[in-house]
Structure formats: C-alpha cells, structure tokens
Image: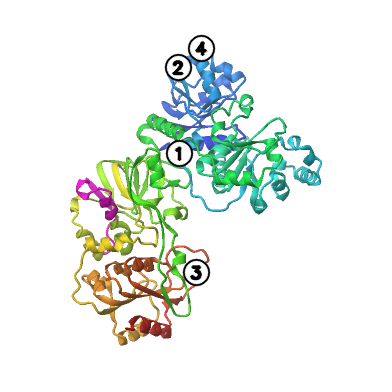
Amino acid sequence: MKHGLLVHGTSGNVGDAIQSLAALRFLSRVDCLVERERLGAIASAGPVKVIMNGWWMKCPEHWPPPPNVIPLFVSFHVTTGPVRAAMVTDESLAYLRRHEPIGCRDLDTTSFLRAAGIDAYFSGCLTMTLPPRPRKDGGEVLFVDPFRGHFFPALPPALADSAEVRRLRQAAGAAGESPADSVDSVLARIVGMPEAWHPGASHHSALVSRETRPRERFRAAEAMLDKLAAARLVVTSRLHAVLPAMALGTPALLVLKDEGSVVSGPPDLADKGHDCTRRDPRLPGLFEQTRHVTLSQLLGGLSDEAWRTAVEEPMRLRADLIAGLEARVADFLGDDLAAKAVAPAAWLPSPEVAARGLGRWRSVYPSATNVRTPHACHGAVKIDLRDRLDPVFPEAGVFELHRPFLQGINGRVFSSDGTLLADHSWYGRHIDELGLAAPRCQGESVPGVSMSLASDFGHKNFCHFVLDGLCRLHLFEAAGIRVAAMDRVYCPPPPSANARRLLDRLGIPEEKFAWLSESTVVRPETLHVATFPGSRRNFPRWLPGFVQERWPVTPSRTARRLFVSRAGYRRAVSNETEVNRLLVAAGFEVFDPAKAPDPQRDFAEAAVIVGAHGAALANLAWCRPGTRVLELLPSDHIYPYYYALAESAGLEYGCLVGRSLKDRAPGDLGPSWSDFHVDEDELAAAVAAITAP
C-alpha cells in the first residue's frame, strides 16, 4: 500500500507545513505528495493512504478526492464560505459517509458536519501529537506574528501617540517590515515584559512565499519548531505556533484579536469566557487548550506576575485527545506506525511514556538527591568532582513495552510512537547532546518476550558493558523480571575476554543471546528494558553490593598495593617509567588487568590502589570498604566516574591531576586522546599520604 503525504503547496503559512510534518512523523515512507488543492493529480497513482488533516480548502472544485485515495479524516477543518457549500452536496455527503467517523480539528467543524448528518467527533489538531523535546533553562521570549496587522489600531490611546511608538512606526516603515519584526526593548516595555527578559526577545515570522517549494517549506517548518522548542515563552496569534509549542513542552500565550476593545482590570490568563470563538471558527475546542490574552490585554501591559505565571505554569495539552489521535492513526497505518521522524528524536522519561498508555512502568527506586562525601585532592590543581555530577538521580525501574524499536549496537530504545526513552541511555537528561534521529527503518518484528542488557558504549568498553549494562539485572530482578522467563536477551558483543568471563558467570544460556550490531533495528513483541543505573558518570550506591553478590570473589590476602597501568592505551601516563620506579619503591605492583586471569580478585586483595583514569578502574566495585584509592586524572579529561564508584563502595578516594600534553577545543565532548604527565614530586607526596598508617 502506498503512503501519501498531504501538502499545501500554495499556502503562505509555515503552519500548514508543520501540519504535514505532524503527519509525516507517523509514516514509514512517503510514496507521493498529495496536494490539497490538486487532489485529482494522483488519480492514476493506485491506492494511496493519506492522513487528511488540516485546513480545507481554497479550491472546492477539486473536492471530493479521487476514488484511489484511502483517507483518514482526523484534525479536519472546513473553512467558511463557498467550501462549506461544496461539503454538503449530495456527492460530498455520500463520500464523507463512506469514511465516517470524521475527526474534526475544532468543535465548529464538528457541529457543521453533524448538522449535515455526518458522524463527526472532535479530534483536536495533529500538531498536538508532536513529541516534547529536551528543554534548557533560559531561552528567549519568541513572538510569532503576535499582531498580524492589528498592532497600531489596537494600541491604547496613551501609547498610540507616544514617542516610543512613533519611533517604532518609523523603524518598521523604513525597513519595510511589520512592527512585529522589530521586537526590541521598546516593544518589550509596551507589552510589560519583565526587564530581565528584554535582551532575549525576538520575532519569528510564520510566513513564506507562496512560490516556495515543498522541501524548503519543510525546512522552514523544522526551523520554526526548533525555535519554538528553544524558547522560554512563545507569544503568538498563530494557532499552529501555539499548539506545536505546547506539544514540544514550551509555554505559550495565544493572542486573540478583540476588535480593539479595552478590557479593564487585571488580565486573567485562564479566562474561558472570551467571545472570539464566535468570530473565529478555528478556535472552539482548541481555544480551551491554551493560555490566552486579548490583543488589548497584551498591548495594555501584562504584569510581571502574569508573565511569570505563563512561563511557570504552562497549560498542558489534554492527554486523552493526544492518545485518541495517535491510536486512530496507528489503526489506520497498521504496522507502519512511527518508523520515521523528520527531526532529532523527541524523548521522554519512561514513566511519562507509560502514562500515555504505551507500556507498563515498574518503579524500583524513586528519584533522589545525589549527596556525596568530599574527596581528597592532591597536587597543585584543586578540583571537586562533586561539581561534575548531576545533582539528582532519576527514578529507576523497568519498562515493559509492546512492539517498541530497539536500535543499534548501543541498544537505544524507542516506544511504538517513535519516542526515545532517554532514561535508558547513558546520556539521560543530556540526550540532546546525542542528536539521535528516530528509528532508521520499520524494523524486523520479533515474536515472544525479550529483555535488553545493552548500554551505550558497552560493545567497546569494559566499564560500560559491565557496570552500565549487566548491572541492570538488579533492576529487573527487583521488579520481578527473571531471565528464565525471557525468549531472548539482547546484548552487545563483550568487548574483552574479562567482560565475556563475567557475562558467562551470569549463567544465561548461550542460545538466549541476541547479539546487537550497528545495523540492528528490531521490534520485539514484548520488550523489558531497565533504566540506566544511576546517571551518567554517577554510579548508585546499590551497584557495588550487587556486583559483589553476583560475581563474588574470596581474597586470599588483603594488603596488596597495585598500580593500574594504562601503558599501550590512549590517555597513558607519558612518564610512566619514572612513575613505575617511584611506585615500586613504595611497595606497589605494576598491574595490567588485561593480562590478569581474575582482576576482580586482585582488586579485592588490594589495600591501596593507584591508577590512571580508565575502564580498568571499574574493578573498584570489587574492593573492600576502606580501600585507599588515588586516581591519576588527565587535565583535559576530568570526569567523576571512579570517584562516584569509590564513594558508593565506601572506599577512601583521592585524585591527582596531571597535565595533558595536548589542548582540547573549548566545549569538546567525548574522551581525550592525549597522554598526560604526572608530576613526580606531587605523586610522591600523594603516595606518602595514602599509605600512611
């Protein structure tokens, strides 16, 4: 079956392209573009499924669609005028009855069709299903065509002749722009915006040339969505700015034309009694979803409290409307739901996805403040690794999903509607650093019940494979999920012989494993996934206890001193020969975990450990409480992984920063490739301190 995407090629409003993007999110592919105003152009294309959302229409002579179009009527709005007459002809009514029920974007269209004898219901707008995106603090106040030509006529008399407004008129006239294109401190003062927000105010026009090609329209729509998602607050008269903004998670104010009437008294941002819905048939039903102000209220100057309320207490789109829309589209498209996205993947925590009816969430640990004890810092460079930890551990648990997407060798998980489950990833609440697109293709359906032990970077790093991945078994077991009940266990290939040995000791039958690769995209019938243990670089306190219970070791001695070398790996100590000599003189063994048959036992036997930052220090999880640790950190790679692990295990942790031999670009993310130099005098003093009785 072909899929067609409804486009609005003669529209000058980017909002129409956003409606197309909202439909595109659900399609696994697009076989043809269906032009709203030229429906007959695809009459010979064979059967085509089309989501018929949006505003209908400028050219009613092209209605109804040709017989080969298989329509889903949701978010359907019929404009006033000649189009409404075309919608109630005998031919049109017969067509609509064949495709009942008709999901209407607004209550006005719903009433109109019901009066004509059509089974119609209020569906809301498909742009309401756009998934939320990660948000950052701050952001600008974004004005998206808030006045639409009504600015100067609606100004209160006291402002209309003011010097500030005259300057604004002159500036707009000289630039050939609408006054709304010059959002500056003058306009910010006119609308009463808090002083601290003035520098961050800007304008974005939702208009494009009617000659713009579809590809450029989509780019303009994506750019507008990016701006909406990044804003502190959106102020707009455009319905298809306010609804997408709210869906993306951005607070928004809808500005309503009120014919210049002056409203006395303080503005009520939640007022539902405004009579604009009788003058604008687009609004009934959607109006109630928004926070809104009249043009007079806005230009009369909102109070600081009103602005703050709009930002701090944003309206929420009704979950039942969104769920109903998504369910109907899912039924219409069948197995092709949500196999494609047009923007970086939206993400949500698993409990919020579960609240939308997309799976069963089992909570194991509630969200908790991250409190760590201070650590010693040796040498001239003083740091506090607590500053590099997320302040809160997110809620941890297990999510049971029906037909989700499991993608790639890192095992990233998307719910059935294409939402990325960020709390299952190493990135967590920092998922926007990843910029991951939604599943690359429809994915292979896999029957039965599965679980995943995958985690980011597990296929190439011992620490990520064992502590981030295999330790998720604790969450599964705490939630009552057992490996024995699984048909398969998804896992990346172990990155080393040591990692493979620990995997084998779990006792999972080899035939249960399904090994992930870079090209993996599967859709298990049922998939159990556990959240990331703790948060990135921040191990939870339960983890060392689980490690020692699941992979127990029995030390035969307890007073060893180990220097964990990184010779032969990147980020090695550049003067290791001198460091080795110093440490051996202090009673240390130079220890290479890759050559040890049981490095977990070696760590458990140590009383003091000195080690360069690297995955081998994941073995600190097997140390006995009170073990003394000195981590050598490169100056361009100061991360708190092993401080957090040591502190969780009850070890006595200290660090010494050495100078990296190469400089990194500011803001450069990811691991360093540079070796680093350890000052021998500083190391000698640190070793004396950690070995003192």
Image quadrant assignment for residue 686? bottom left
Residue drawn at point x = 29 percent, y = 82 percent: 588
Residue 536 is situated, as x and y percent measured from the top left of the image, at: 40, 59
Disc number for residue 664: 3
Residue 45 is situated, as x and y percent measured from the top left of the image, at: 44, 27
Q: Nearer the viewer, residue 305 or 164?
A: 305
Q: CA distance from mark 3 to mark 2?
A: 66 Å
Mark with earlier residue (3, 2): 2
Q: CA distance from mark 4 to mark 2?
A: 11 Å
Q: Give the residue type that dot 1 points to.
A: Arg
Say if 497 sits above or below 662 in the image: above
Q: Give the residue type that dot 4 points to.
A: Asp
Q: Is residue 601 visible?
A: yes
Q: Which residue is mark 4?
A: 90
Disc number for residue 129: none
Q: Nearer the viewer, residue 103 or 378?
A: 378
Disc number for residue 97: 2
| Left or right of 458 on screen, residue 297 | right
Residue drawn at point x = 18 percent, y = 56 percent: 507
| Left or right of 77 on screen, residue 438 | left
Q: Which residue is mark 1?
A: 25
Graded by Cα atoms within 10 Å as few (under 14), some (14 to 19) or many (20 or more), the crowding at tag 2 reads some
Graded by Cα atoms within 10 Å as few (under 14), some (14 to 19) or many (20 or more), the crowding at tag 3 reads some
